[in-house]
């Protein structure tokens, strides 16, 4: 569920964080670039910072929520750390996927070779027998 139709909660959260990082005096231009209205962003900001965005609730408090520059900087650092952690995890998982795909390809080739070996030498495992079907052995006969 979303507070505003057409936007997911993840998109709203991202827009609010971007809005918080925009310098004072440039927010109206930022809103115009994205085709957003000020009252939507204010409503979204209240929901994000009130912890109610995922439930689609907006707090009824009417006071403003402008963050001081120090808190904006901390927020930006936190988001950058989250992104870096996410990118590192993504890269680790992609490396693991490549490793597993290479292992899978090697196993497939090994199985194929085993099948070829079995097709080429099927009689190699059977014991040699004489005409009567019994094993033949040569033992020296003793003459007296």
Image (cartoon, helix red, strand yellow):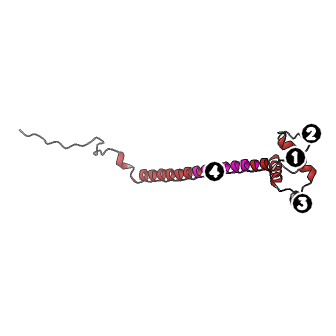
Q: Quadrant of residue 139?
A: top left
Q: Check if mark 3's residue and mark 4's residue have beta carbons within 8 Å.
A: no
**Residue at (52, 50) in percent of width and height:** 103
Q: What's the CA distance linking mark 2 and mark 1?
A: 13 Å
Expressed as whole percent of the image width and height from the top left, the position of residue 144 reads 5, 38
Which of 136 and 71 lies nearest the eye of the viewer? 71
Q: Which residue in the protein does label 2 denote?
A: 61
Q: Is residue 109 left or right of residue 92?
A: left
Report the Cα–Cα distance between label 3 and label 4.
34 Å
Nearer to us of marks 2 and 1 is 2
**Magenta residue check for 58:** no
Tag 1 residue:
44
Label 2 SS: loop
Q: Is residue 67 left or right of residue 138?
A: right
Q: Residues within 10 Å of mark 4 (few under 14, many from 20)?
A: few
Image: magenta residue range: 75-96
Q: Is residue 94 magenta?
A: yes
Q: Which residue is pictured at 92% across the width and 53% down the height?
A: 38
- Residue 26 placement (x, y as % from top left): 86, 59
**What residue is disc 4 on?**
88
Local SS, label 3? helix
Separation (CA) of disc 1 from disc 3: 17 Å
Q: Which residue is mark 3?
A: 32
**Image quarter (top left, top right, bottom left or bottom right) of the N terminus:** top right
Q: Between disc 3 and disc 2, whose residue precedes?
A: 3
């Amino acid at each position: 569920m979303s507070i505003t139709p057409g936007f997911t909660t993840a998109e709203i959260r991202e827009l609010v964080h971007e809005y918080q990082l925009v310098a004072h005096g440039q927010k109206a231009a930022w809103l115009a670039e994205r085709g957003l209205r000020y009252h939507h962003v204010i409503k979204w900001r209240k929901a994000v910072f009130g912890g109610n965005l995922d439930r689609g609730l907006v707090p009824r408090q009417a006071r403003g929520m402008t963050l001081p520059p120090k808190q904006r900087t901390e927020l930006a650092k936190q988001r950058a750390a989250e992104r870096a952690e996410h990118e590192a995890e993504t890269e680790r998982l992609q490396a693991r996927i490549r490793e597993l795909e290479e292992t899978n390809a090697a196993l497939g080739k090994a199985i194929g070779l085993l099948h070829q070996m079995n097709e080429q030498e099927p009689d190699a495992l059977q014991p040699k027998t004489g005409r009567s079907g019994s094993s033949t052995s040569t033992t020296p006969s003793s003459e007296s």
